[in-house]
Amino acid sequence: MIGETVYCSSSARAGEIDVDGYAVIEQGSSVRGGSRLRNCIVMPGTEVTGSHENCIIGPDYEIPLTEDEMQPRPMGDEKDIGLAGPLYSFFETPAAGKGGIAKAVLIGLGGSDRRYFRVQKGTVTAVLMECGREDPDYERHLTYTKFFHSHGVPVPRLLGTDEPNRRALFEDLGDLSLHSWLRFPHDADIVEALYRACSTSSSACTAVPRSM
């Protein structure tokens, strides 16, 4: 589970659902198509419908929790960052102006001390990747992103880079990675429908992965 945002038991079932943040779907449970989960734990034998956020869901009960309680440590750690410089030009809007301070929340970890932060200024968000000075995957990450975009693969858009300090800013598409999405035991008809949609239109594929 290290580095993962989703756990789904092999005996659980999930339709075409929207998942954001962290989710645990235990054995024998079922999440109906059209449901939405954000930071939720679904207990064994529970059938879920509708939208749920920051809670533990049982067969006949729901226990609300705070956002902080649902974030595994060190996830959710925060820091303030200055938005000066070309890396953060994405946040320069007529309403927000230039520069300023934004809140950055840790949302993911990678190899070689790589860290991902959600940066927010007002209603505008982006994902900041910080890499160690010796991390060889920094250049690879940027190369893969540009390559996938050039071939119509729906990955987060690269918004800016700070190569001397090994930092890059990406479009924020939510917390669910394609790898985590694939961990769900989707029904065969849902998989076939998505495959056929992606075969006929590259834009239809954007409904599947929300982030890399």
Image: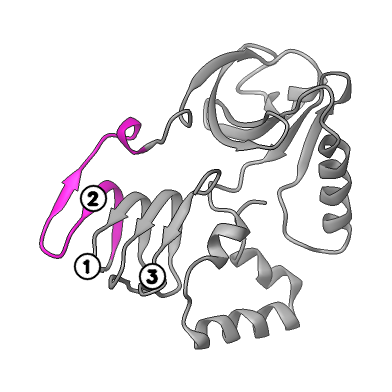
Please state which amino acid type lies under the numbered disc 2.
Ile
Please state which amino acid type lies under the numbered disc 3.
Gly
**Image quadrant where residue 33 sits:** bottom left
| Closer to us: 86 or 32 | 32
Q: Position of residue 173 (x, y in %)?
A: 60, 48
Q: Is residue 197 magenta?
A: no
Please state which amino acid type lies under the numbered disc 1.
Thr
| Closer to us: 66 or 11 | 11
Q: Nearer the viewer, mark 3 or mark 2?
A: 2
Q: Which residue is mark 1?
A: 46
Chosen colour scheme: one colour
Q: Which residues are magenta?
A: 50-70
Helix, strand or loop status at disc 1? loop
Q: Residue at x 55, y 58 (%)?
A: 180
Q: Residue at x 74, y 82 (%)?
A: 199
Q: Which mark is residue 34?
A: 3
Do residues under tags 2 and 1 come within 8 Å of each other at their CB atoms? no
Q: Nearer the viewer, mark 3 or mark 1?
A: 1
Q: Which mark is residue 56?
A: 2
